[in-house]
Image: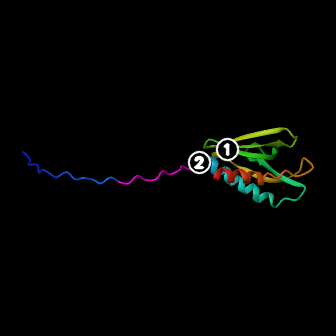
């Protein structure tokens, strides 16, 4: 059985305006920003003879680190810099999907407490400009 086809007019579709580009969320940067804000708030509660430390939860409760800096690499890694209880330098590279940090008050290892919150706040401000 033969079918008759009806000729349809060709419709002109208007071009849609180009959508603005959206910056993709960087999970490492988001975690980094949150950790910095947490460190700043935590340091405000410390006594003069305490400074901020971190207990690396996934390494057991025995490893405590005097935090000296925090950073991030690419989209998914955070880095914590500091010294362990023996004063030896340590650097933890942590994937954001495995991130667990317990902020703790620890006794200072120098004459003055190491307050890193204001340094980290400055870094955060510079990055957002």
The residue positioned farthest toward the right in the image shown: 111
> Which region is colored magenta?
16-27
The residue positioned farthest toward the bottom in the image shown: 45
Does the residue at mark 1 contact the one at mark 2 (Cβ under 8 Å)?
yes
Would you name the residue on which mark 2 appears? 26
Q: Residues within 10 Å of mark 2 (few under 14, many from 20)?
A: few
Kindly identify the residue that appears in the image at 68 percent across and 47 percent down.
99
Q: Is residue 18 magenta?
A: yes
Q: Cα distance, mark 1 to mark 2?
A: 10 Å
Can residue 61 be seen in the rendering of this structure? no
Q: Is 26 left or right of 68, judged from the image as shown?
A: left
Residue 34 occupies quadrant: bottom right
Image coords of residue 104 (percent x, y): 81, 53
Q: Is residue 26 above or below residue 45?
A: above
Q: Secondary structure at mark 1?
A: strand
Give the prevailing secondary structure in the magenta stretch: loop
Q: Residues within 10 Å of mark 1 (few under 14, many from 20)?
A: many
Image coords of residue 18 (percent x, y): 40, 52
Q: Which mark is residue 21?
A: none
Q: Is 36 left or right of 48, judged from the image as shown?
A: left
Would you name the residue on which mark 1 appears? 72
Kindly identify the residue that appears in the image at 74 percent across and 41 percent down.
92
Residue 76 occupies quadrant: top right
Kindly identify the residue that appears in the image at 87 percent across and 59 percent down.
47
Image coords of residue 43 (percent x, y): 80, 57
Residue 14 occupies quadrant: bottom left
Q: Secondary structure at mark 2?
A: loop
Taking depth in this image into account, of 64 and 10 the one nearest to the observer is 10
């Amino acid at each position: 059985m033969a079918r008759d086809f009806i000729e349809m007019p060709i419709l002109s579709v208007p071009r849609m305006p180009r959508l603005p580009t959206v910056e993709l969320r960087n999970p490492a940067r988001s975690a980094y920003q949150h950790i910095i804000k947490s460190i700043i708030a935590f340091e405000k509660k410390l006594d003069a003879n305490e400074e901020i430390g971190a207990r690396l939860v996934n390494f057991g409760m025995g490893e405590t680190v005097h935090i000296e800096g925090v950073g991030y690499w690419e989209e998914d890694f955070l880095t914590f810099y500091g010294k362990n209880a023996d004063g030896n330098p340590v650097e933890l590279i942590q994937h954001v999907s495995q991130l667990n940090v317990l902020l703790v008050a620890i006794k200072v290892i120098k004459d003055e407490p190491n307050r890193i919150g204001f340094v980290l706040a400055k870094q955060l401000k510079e990055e957002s400009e």
